[in-house]
Amino acid sequence: MRVTASELKQQIAACTICAKALPHDPRPVTSWRACSRILIIGQAPGRAVHESGVPWQDASGRLLRSWLSVSEESFYNNRLFAFVPMGFCFPGKGKSGDLVPRPECAPQWHELILRHLRNVQLTILIGRHAQDRYLGDSACENLTENVRNFDRFLPDYFPLPHPSPRNRPWLSRNPWFEEQLLPQLRRRVSSALR
């Protein structure tokens, strides 16, 4: 029996499938409505997002909003944007940053959520984990090539690097991203929000 969007959100909020692997209590962070127009599939919440419960409410989110050229008000309007990360809970810290997303969430929840998202005009895949899952065999050899060849995945997906401050060296090495790709991304976002 198909669950309603409201029931599904309650089930996700109560999810504990990765509890034993987390350094804290689970706190799944997603945001979506059936009418959302842009779907952002990211990695996993960071510590700040874990504490606030608000997706992308950190330095990465500020940079992402500038990449998309949208206001904070629009970004957090779930009629416009849906946020469905690969891992719904903060996975904890590792030696060189946050740990990778927990593997349980996407197989457990993504398909159920996507069935409810009937108005999505643009799906943005942020980071290698989201791209590996959704681009599958059509993915390029690495994230840089996925992003550079974004038009190969349209209209289904638009791959992006993670907007983490830790990725500044990547942005410096790839000036084409800001010069050539961001204008294309902004046009697609603007069109999807019309």
Image: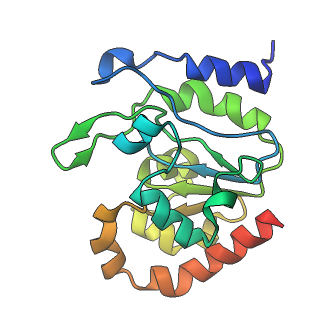
* Quarter the C terminus occupies: bottom right
Nearer to me, 84 or 176: 84
Nearer to me, 140 or 187: 187
Q: Is residue 46 visible?
A: no
Q: Quadrant of residue 10?
A: top right
Residue 6 at what x, y percent from top left? 75, 23
Please report the residue visible at 77 percent of the width from the left and 40 percent of the height from the top: 117
Residue 139 at what x, y percent from top left? 51, 58
Please report the residue visible at 42 percent of the width from the left and 53 percent of the height from the top: 58
Residue closest to the far left: 95
Residue 49 at what x, y percent from top left? 44, 42
* Quarter the N terminus occupies: top right
Q: Is residue 2 depicted above or below 164 in this figure?
A: above
Residue closest to the far top: 1
User: Which coloring applies here?
Assistant: rainbow
Q: Is residue 182 depicted above or below 99 in this figure?
A: below
Please report the residue visible at 47 percent of the width from the left and 79 percent of the height from the top: 177
Is 32 left, or right, of 134 in this rendering?
Answer: right
Residue 132 at what x, y percent from top left? 48, 48
Nearer to me, 150 or 38: 38
Q: Is residue 178 visible?
A: yes
Q: Is residue 60 depicted above or below 2 in this figure?
A: below
